[in-house]
Amino acid sequence: MNCLLVVNTLSGNASKVREDELIEKYAAGDSVTVQYIRDEEDSYSVNGVDKLIVCGGDGTLNHAINLCRDKDIDIYYLPFGTFNETAKGQRRGAQLAKLGRIADLDFAYVAAAGSFTDIGYSLSTKTKRRYKVFAYFSRVLKSYKVHRIQADISFGDISESGVYTLIMLSNARRCFGFRFNRLHRDNTDELQLITVKAPKKDGIWGRIKMFFPFFRVFFIGTGKDYKSKNIRFLSVKNVVIDLKEPTPFCVDGECRSLSGEVVALKTEHKARVYLIKP
């Protein structure tokens, strides 16, 4: 069996990777090639590969699942990133049989735009390595601002228009450090759609008003579909989001610009994705 071991040296805890130990444990008897990601522009090919072992953070996993979505291949993900949200939200050895997809991008745990979401992709590698998870906390105040995302959102037989400070599709129990999504069930056909409408005013007053729905979503959470004047928190099989302007989304910790009408749903991969906690 041909195995490719990819080590993302840009990940926050890449220094803890022990290649020989991983090969002995997960690829004994295989023909193994080791490739290192040392620059953000570096890439790799999986042609002729039967088993892919990726060591890195959530973005490293996201790259792998998008690269291998139509390939008959086993992917073993070992979390060596800073936050490792996908790993923390799943049990050891879990198979991620069904992933999220928005537009033409697959994601393991989240696709979100608006307030706080830039925390996932705005930090430099140097900062993450030096300060670890504390680096993310330093960005909270800078990211605590009102966004105005104009969009039409349709799911089931419901269609609504609004201006949102948060639009999120969740495929995990936790995100952004909060274990809040009690609606999530592993490997089902449903994602969770979370939206928070933008307050009418920006500035200090707008941020004060924004605090309460965010507290309700992330600190309290919900175990059943929830709807209020400013919040939607519910399970959907698919949702259509018509974005009126190009909008940056945090997709598993990577920044992706989406625009126009995008569809989000669950998808089953040909590749088999396994979460391994070292």
Image (cartoon, helix red, strand yellow):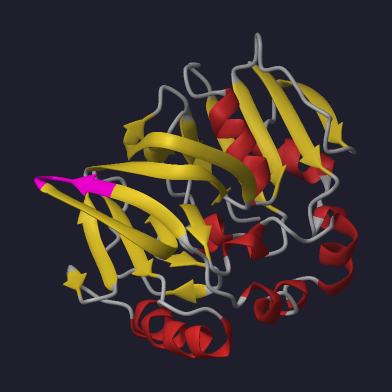
Single out the residue that lies furthest toward the top.
48
Residue 223 location in percent, x, y?
Answer: 22, 74
Residue that appears at 49% across and 84% down: 206
Asked whether residue 94 is drawn in magenta, I would say no
Left or right for 141, reference 6 = left
Residue that appears at 30% across and 60% down: 184
Single out the residue that lies furthest toward the front.
201
Left or right for 146, reference 125 = left
Residue 88 location in percent, x, y?
Answer: 53, 64
Asked whether residue 155 is drawn in magenta, I would say yes
Residue 6 location in percent, x, y?
Answer: 76, 34
Taking depth in this image into account, of 51 and 159 the one nearest to the observer is: 159
Q: Quadrant of the C terminus?
A: bottom right
Q: Is residue 209 above or below residue 52?
A: below
Q: Quadrant of the N terminus?
A: top right
Residue 51, by quadrant, is top right
Taking depth in this image into account, of 37 and 74 the one nearest to the observer is: 37
Residue 13, by quadrant, is bottom right
Taking depth in this image into account, of 101 and 54 the one nearest to the observer is: 101
Residue that appears at 30% across and 45% down: 187
Residue that appears at 19% across and 46% down: 155
Question: Would residue 102 be visible to someone looking at this image?
Answer: no
Residue 48, by quadrant, is top right
Q: Is residue 63 above or below residue 82?
A: above
Question: Would residue 101 be visible to someone looking at this image?
Answer: yes
Q: Across the whole image, how many numbered discs are drawn on residues?
A: 0
The stretch of residues the image draws in magenta is 153-157
